[in-house]
Amino acid sequence: MKKNKKSIIDKHGLCLNEYKSNYNNAKVYYDRAVGASPEMEVSKAMSNLLKKVVKKDDKILDVGCATGHFYRSMKKRINKNFYYTGTDPYSIFLDKAKHAWRNDEKANFIKGNIYKLPFKKNQFDISICSNVFIHLNDVRKPISEICRVTNKIIILRTVLYDVSYKVQLVYNNKWWSDTDIKPINEFDNKGNPRAYSYFNILSFDFLTETIKKFNPNAKIKIIKDTFFDAKKIRKSVKNEKRPLATRILGNEQMSGCIMQPHYFVIIELNK
């Protein structure tokens, strides 16, 4: 299949170049899903948080599941029976997810967009969403959607700070193979980037008040993600060779020159 390198912006303000044709990322995630590569540190941390709250036969939704590589970590750590559904808008990841877990009757993958999840109200006991909000232009509708389809608990992982920052990573074809934009053409005549990804940082106040808007009775617990082995992250960066892959500076995770203070946000919905 020939890659389409023309810059495509969807109706939600997402530039799709990074996602629709990123065969390198799809392979990296698939190798994690099938055990050919080590688990992500974050998938282990998420699974350890989940095992404290999962009840027998719970239905768990993974929003932005890619190839279902978090499911591998969950299966290794959660000692109760549960049913997993992964949803992602990009076929390049879902096709590999379905292949990786084709013999697992408790895993299901459905194409879906976080802005309009293809599920019924309260269909899942628990929902997780990791490393997605950082790349969204607006998180208010996604929060309302996850709250809608979840009955008990939501666990988010995203980048938070005292104040919010709107950040765009701008692509050019000198360092990013999935775009045809030359360095001289990174920005249009109005100064807007032609191909980009969001790397947004949300304020604690904005996120918690937005959650409360859609579920006033929610109990929210925010935990700094310190649950990682820096040596293993450095090794994965070396082995996977992905542009701007997570690296460690001191005790913080970085992407390029941007510090990313990741947090887990545990939401008890109390519906």
Image (cartoon, rainbow, N blue to C red):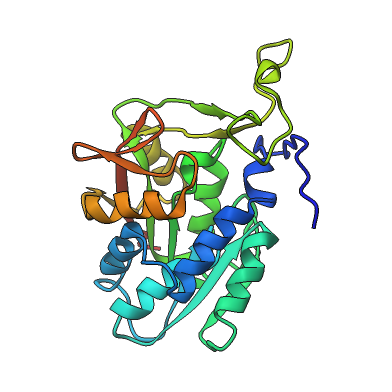
Identify which residue is drawn at 28% across, 61% down.
45
Image-based side of 252 in relation to 58, left or right: left
The quadrant of the rendering that contains the C terminus is: bottom left
In the rendered image, the vertical position of residue 252 relative to residue 238, given as above or below? above
Q: Quadrant of residue 195?
A: top right
Identify which residue is drawn at 29% across, 28% down.
162
Where residue 77 sits: x, y (%)?
29, 77
Image-based side of 92 in relation to 236, left or right: right
Q: Nearer the viewer, residue 74 or 19?
A: 19
Where residue 90 sits: x, y (%)?
66, 57
Image-based side of 157 in relation to 250, left or right: right
Where residue 17 sits: x, y (%)?
68, 42
Is residue 61 visible to the viewer in this orientation of the structure? no
In the rendered image, the vertical position of residue 172 relative to residue 71, given as above or below? above
Identify which residue is drawn at 23% across, 50% down.
230
In the rendered image, the vertical position of residue 212 relative to residue 168, given as above or below? below
The quadrant of the rendering that contains the N terminus is: bottom right
Report how many numbered discs are placed on residues in the image.
0
Is residue 58 visible to the viewer in this orientation of the structure? yes
Q: Quadrant of residue 35?
A: bottom left
Q: Nearer the viewer, residue 230 or 10?
A: 230
Identify which residue is drawn at 34% across, 25% down.
163
